[in-house]
Amino acid sequence: MGRDGARPSNLSREGRLLACRCRQLAGNNFQKRNLILKKDCFGETPKPARETRALPTPIREIRAIRGCIRKLGILPVILDRLEAVSAEVRAGLANA
């Protein structure tokens, strides 16, 4: 049990498997995008671009992670844990 008497929350086996699968999907998308963006220069120095371009935003990966957090329902757990840690830090600073 935790300090406040509450039982620590554990994710179910299915939740852990879903989290692993979501991370794997996000990683695969990132690796595929890197392979597509590579250019062969055949030993020559690449020429500079004519204009600067914005870097591609990994929107799919962000959406995948957001979706996994929603499916697992772990956002409240994360927020509670952050609140507990910040309370411990504040208490430690007050005692110092």
Image: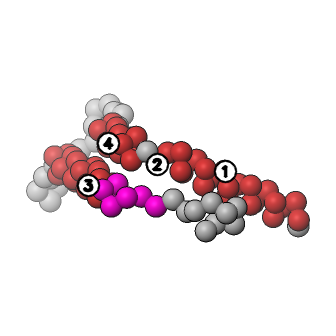
Q: CA distance from mark 4 to mark 2?
A: 15 Å
What label sits on residue 74 in the rendered view?
A: 2
SS assignment at label 3? helix
What label sits on residue 64 in the rendered view?
A: 4
Q: CA distance from mark 3 to mark 1?
A: 28 Å
Q: Is residue 8 left or right of residue 47?
A: right
Query: So how many labels did they put on this image?
Result: 4
The three-letter amino acid code for the residue at tag 3 is: Arg
| Quadrant, the N terminus | bottom right
The three-letter amino acid code for the residue at tag 1 is: Glu
User: Which tag is nearer the camera, tag 4 or tag 2?
Assistant: 2
The three-letter amino acid code for the residue at tag 2 is: Ile
Callout 3–callout 4 Cβ contact below 8 Å: no
User: Which tag is nearer the camera, tag 3 or tag 4?
Assistant: 3
Picture coordinates of residue 54, whole percent (x, y): 36, 34
Query: Pointer 3: what residue?
Result: 21
Determine if residue 89 is in view.
Answer: yes
Q: Residues within 10 Å of mark 4 (few under 14, many from 20)?
A: some
Q: Is residue 63 magenta?
A: no
Q: Is the residue 58 above or below the residue 9 in the image?
A: above
Query: Pointer 1: what residue?
Result: 83
Q: CA distance from mark 4 to mark 1?
A: 25 Å
Foreground pick, 48 / 55: 55
The magenta span reads: 10-16
